[in-house]
Amino acid sequence: MRGRFTDQGGLFSYIAPDKRVPANHPLRKVRDLVRDVLSDLSRSLGKLYASEGRPSIPPEQLLSALLLQVFYGIRSERQLMEQLDYNLLYRWFVGLSPDDPVWDPTTFTKNRERLQNGDVFTKFMTRLLNHPQVQPLLSDEHFSVDGTLIEAWASQKSFRPKDGSGDDDDGANFHGQKRKNDTHASTSDPDSRLYRKAAGREAKLCYMGHATMENRHGLAVAGRVTHANGSAERRASETMLKARRKAAGRRITAGEDKAYDTADHVANLRAIGVTPHVTQNQAITKTGKTRNSAIDERTTRHAGYGMSQSRRAMTECIFGWGKQHGTMRKTKHRGIARVAADFLLNLIAYNLIRIPKLLAA
């Protein structure tokens, strides 16, 4: 027989949000990992807040909500609060009951700044990688490093002369003008830089994100954001690999693409105890000569060099996921500190998506 239609249904529900989430939902294992790490961070999180006054947003729920934003590519905190209000899956993951009110977007943003200033994202990444289930998955000897461009939240019209000239057209007509980072800066995001990815490509206002990946399972182990310039990738690589080398306590290897094939960078890596498995750059120059690579047969003759080159390509999966599913393609934040925090959140989210699959394999 035909069922009876009753608009809105019952007034009360006696089913817990946990019962609404399927037993095999992928967020279940991710939530367990996040809860374990947050419990270890409880003491560090407590130091960020005063012992008296009005209660703030619990940092555990704040960080869980930020991870949801990256998992589902939610474009703003305002939209995140809107979806958190009616989505039972999101409420269950964050730890809100169906009757709990959601937070004001402005309050949420200000509390996010507290976590960012307290270096909580870096601590979360470190605790996650040191988790008893995660640590056996990681290599402490073989790594890969790569960089990617993160488009800034600033328009070309905002890239104006630093001396204040050229204000007649409000920056609308810049065609035919010579614009350089030395003489121009964005009025809306001064930390961004005009950068061209390759010859023949358009120049964009952007930042440069750098990630270090371990080669065993392709998990991100470190990340940082710098100004976009020609040497940023190499300098960031040296800084991150020096920390990896110190943590390992022995010589490590680093796979990198041909953009890192310069004599000074290769020499710097060897000086800090890193074997540079850099792709040889033997391209033909504009004058018709073949470029001399800083990597010779002393490195390429070993089987490990070929293995590093093969694993190195997995760093593109990290950036690809962050730009396709996360919030890495075009940042919604301004200032290098905020962009760096969001970039690190994308690396954490990528690891959280990957780790349950690796543990189940």
Image (cartoon, rainbow, N blue to C red):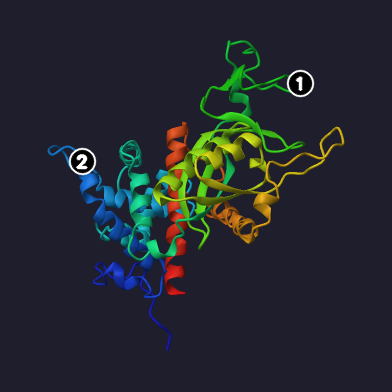
Disc 2 on helix, strand or loop? loop
Name the image quarter holding the N terminus.
Answer: bottom left
Taking 102 as reference, is 223 left or right? right
**How many neighbours does mark 1 have within 10 angstroms: few (below 14), some (14-19), or many (20 or more)?**
few
Question: Pointer 2: what residue?
Answer: 47
Which residue extends farthest left?
Answer: 52
Question: Pointer 1: what residue?
Answer: 176
Residue 257 x/y as whole percent: 65, 47
Quick check: 360 above or below 198? below
Taking 120 as reference, is 319 left or right? right
Q: Residue at x 47, y 36 (%)?
A: 333
Quarter-of-image position of residue 98: bottom left
Confirm or deny contact between disc 1 and disc 2 (CB under 8 A).
no
| Front in this rendered view, residue 116 or 249 | 249
Which residue extends farthest right?
Answer: 288
Circle nearer the N terminus (1, 2): 2
Q: Is residue 76 visible?
A: no
**How many neighbours does mark 2 have within 10 angstroms: few (below 14), some (14-19), or many (20 or more)?**
few
| Front in this rendered view, residue 56 or 83 | 56
Quick check: 132 above or below 191? below
Which residue extends farthest bottom?
Answer: 1
| Front in this rendered view, residue 193 or 314 | 314
Quarter-of-image position of residue 35: bottom left
Residue 136 x/y as whole percent: 40, 65
| Front in this rendered view, residue 75 or 323 | 323
Q: What's the distance in space between the residues labelled 1 and 2, CA to CA?
A: 54 Å
